[in-house]
Amino acid sequence: MLNERPRIMGILNVTPDSFSDGGLHAETDAAIAHGLRLWHEGADILDIGGESTRPGSLAVPPEEQLRRVLPVICGLRERLPKNILLSIDTTSATVARAALDAGADWINDTSAGLDAPEMLALAAEYSSPIVLMHRQGRPRTMQHNPHYIDVVSEVRDHLGERAEAARTAGLTAEQIWLDPGIGFGKSKEHNLSLLAALDRLVNLGYPVLLGASRKRFLGMICGLDTPSELAPATCATTTLGVMAGARVFRVHDVAANRQALEVAWAIQQTGHEACA
């Protein structure tokens, strides 16, 4: 897997309140059109969510999540090539099961299977890859003074434990994806520390997904308040992530990050060939 070109996961929020694009694709037709646009821009995977996990957000009942996402999943599955994967972004096993039945291929769980303990067994039942993300606290309060003694070690240890739980549930190492949870219960300094030490997470032996797209800490660094202006900053994290060994990049701005990925990948592969 480490010799395979990394992939781009395009973000498709079917929500009224996501931090960057809330409301833009809340209607089914608009969401399907945006998903097709992300595919044409170079997305390999589309991550479809019906519940915002932005700081301060409240939980959305499974029934409402399903009302939002199922028509989009079905519509995209009918229109997209089979090699373009669909991911359901949810912490609800009820939503995940219905999404998989409707044509989704992956589960992206920001609670790493802790909000719904049956989630890991569900992924194993469907042989579905699952993204296990680190999150301190819950979205409503997670940015209220997050605290760590050693953020890199604590995130790494937690994700290692959740990966072992997924293995016990019947998933293979290739089906378990780890996400450090940039911006989920972390300060700017915590996020930078995790990005600087991303290779330590990669060294656990599981494929790593990085989701730093348009995050607030990038705006703090760049002096920008508008998330949509942070595509270049996000590309910097994608480039760094490729060089550190991350395999999937969850982004809003697919075309720009596709370019960043391809250049970083070409440089990395040339370096490997020179050392061979």
Image: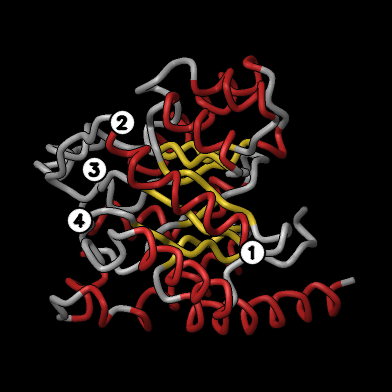
Mark 3 vs 1: CB contact within 8 A: no
Which residue position holds label 3? Answer: 185
Of helix, strand and loop, which one carries label 3? loop
Would you place residue 73 above or below residue 131 in this image? Answer: below
Can you tell which of label 3 and label 1 is closer to the viewer?
Answer: 1
Q: CA distance from mark 4 to mark 3?
A: 22 Å
Percent x, y of residue 10: 48, 64
Q: Residue at x 63, y 45 (%)?
A: 203
Q: Is residue 94 left or right of residue 127?
A: left
Q: Is residue 20 in sight in this rendering?
A: no
Q: Which of the labelled discs sits on residue 80, or is there none?
A: 1
Which residue position holds label 2? Answer: 63
Percent x, y of residue 6: 66, 64
Q: Which of the labelled discs sits on residue 239, or is there none?
A: none
Q: CA distance from mark 1 to mark 2?
A: 26 Å
Q: CA distance from mark 4 to mark 2?
A: 16 Å
Type of amino acid at the residue the image marks with label 2: Glu
Q: CA distance from mark 4 to mark 1?
A: 25 Å
Tell me which numbered mark, 3 or 1, is placed earlier along the sequence.
1
Q: Residue at x 39, y 22 (%)?
A: 114
Tell me which numbered mark, 4 or 1, is placed earlier along the sequence.
4
Q: Is residue 96 in sight in this rendering?
A: yes
Percent x, y of residue 182: 35, 52
Tell me which numbered mark, 4 or 2, is placed earlier along the sequence.
4
Q: Quadrant of the C terminus?
A: bottom right
Q: Which of the labelled discs sits on residue 16, or is there none?
A: 4
